Image (spheres, rainbow, N blue to C red):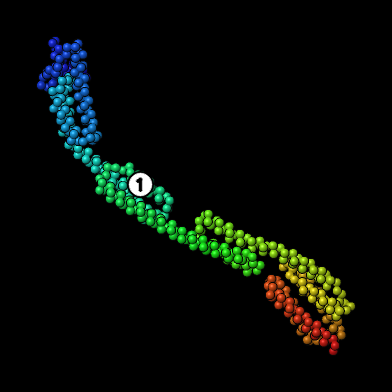
Amino acid sequence: MDPAAWGRVDDDGTVYVRTADGERAVGSWQAGDPATGLAHYARRYADLATEVSLLEARLRAHTGNPGELKKKAQALADSIPEAAAVGDLDGLAARARAMVGTADEAAAESRAEKAAARAAQVARKEALAAEAEQIAAESTAWKAAGDRLKAIVEEWKTIRGIDRKTDEALWSRFAAARDAFGRRRGAHFAALDAQRSESRAAKQELIAEAQRLSTSTEWGPTSAAMRTLMDRWKGVPRTGRDGDDDLWKQFRAAQDAFFAARAESDKERNREQLENQRQKEELLAEAERIDPSTDPRGAQNRLRRIQERYDAIGHVPRGAMRTLEDRMQAVEQRVRGAADSSRARSAPENPMVTSMRAAVTKAEEQLVKAEAAGDAQRVAEARANLTTRREWLAEAERSASRR
């Protein structure tokens, strides 16, 4: 702004400002040239203009008390026309008066903004309270939900500008939800602890039963019982990672002890059966060397003695059983065929002998089936039956030969 456009300094040093009402003396300048004097009073005007501009900015920004701002605007509007300054005092005073006119409007806007801000803050806390209530009612992600409630508390502290009554009511909602969640979480973990205690007791009982069975030598029934224990174990809920691992190690150790003993027994049984197979093969070789063509009855007696020794030998491997029995049957058929041919040449065979021989054949077949099934009781019964039938056949043959 050019101060010369708004004032002058006359020859005696009086400083004038130009207004709509004419010139008005605002002071005296005796310290130097007139331009310097005008600049001095122009700076005073600039100070007043800065004050007006700042007040306008505060009104626009709605900062400060609107009533106080209005009073300051009125004071400026009253003082500017009489100010000892050089500049557009009329225009500056008009700006001040305009602020007085808009102060009430600014106050209303400020109140509306504060109400909106308050409503927004209330809405934030209401949303947080509602979230907490939903967590309390539904969430089962216990750790994540607990962490979220803690985060809500920290966020809650940053939300301000709410009247005390509303704030306390919202806090009561949040606190009630947090307490409800805490009770529900506590009940859940209490139930979980109770379940884990029940599971621990059930698994300890299974461990004790497995340990009792671990020394059993009844391999078949105990193996089935161990499998049943395993199925029952799988049906019991976990007791927690660390505790469950320890219990499992104890249970598995008992099962491993039994199955290791069974495996060792199987090895020993296999060794025995292989030895039995070797002995039966030796007897079969001896039986296969029998020549019934010259003495059929003597061949039968020799074969019977071999068969008695053969039957007294225990089990052989299942895979070898059929081959051995087939070989023995082949010898029996060869010897029996020679005897039958001899009897056919001499005289018809006694019907009782024929019946006894059929009974022996049937008993032999029953023994083979029992051994194939691996049923020890059936094998013992079949072997005893075969021995009896052979004794009856021998007696029948002796009786027939005496006639």
- Above or below, 314 relative to 257: below
Q: Secondary structure at mark 1?
A: helix
The quadrant where residue 222 appears:
bottom right
Q: Residue furthest bottom?
A: 403
- Residues packed near mark 1 inside 10 Å, few (<14), some (14 to 19) or many (20 plus): some
What residue is shown at x 65% (from left), y 69% (from top)? Answer: 218
- Above or below, 308 relative to 20: below
What residue is shown at x 61% (from left), y 59% (from top)? Answer: 253
What residue is shown at x 69% (from left), y 64% (from top)? Answer: 265
Is 19 displayed left or right of 161 in the figure? left
- Above or below, 381 relative to 229: below
What quarter of the picture does the N terminus occupy? Answer: top left
Residue 140 % position (x, y): 41, 55
Is 66 displayed left or right of 378 in the figure? left
Residue 105 % position (x, y): 18, 37
What quarter of the picture does the C terminus occupy? Answer: bottom right
Residue 325 % position (x, y): 76, 72
Residue 372 % position (x, y): 70, 71
In the rendered image, is residue 335 in sight? no
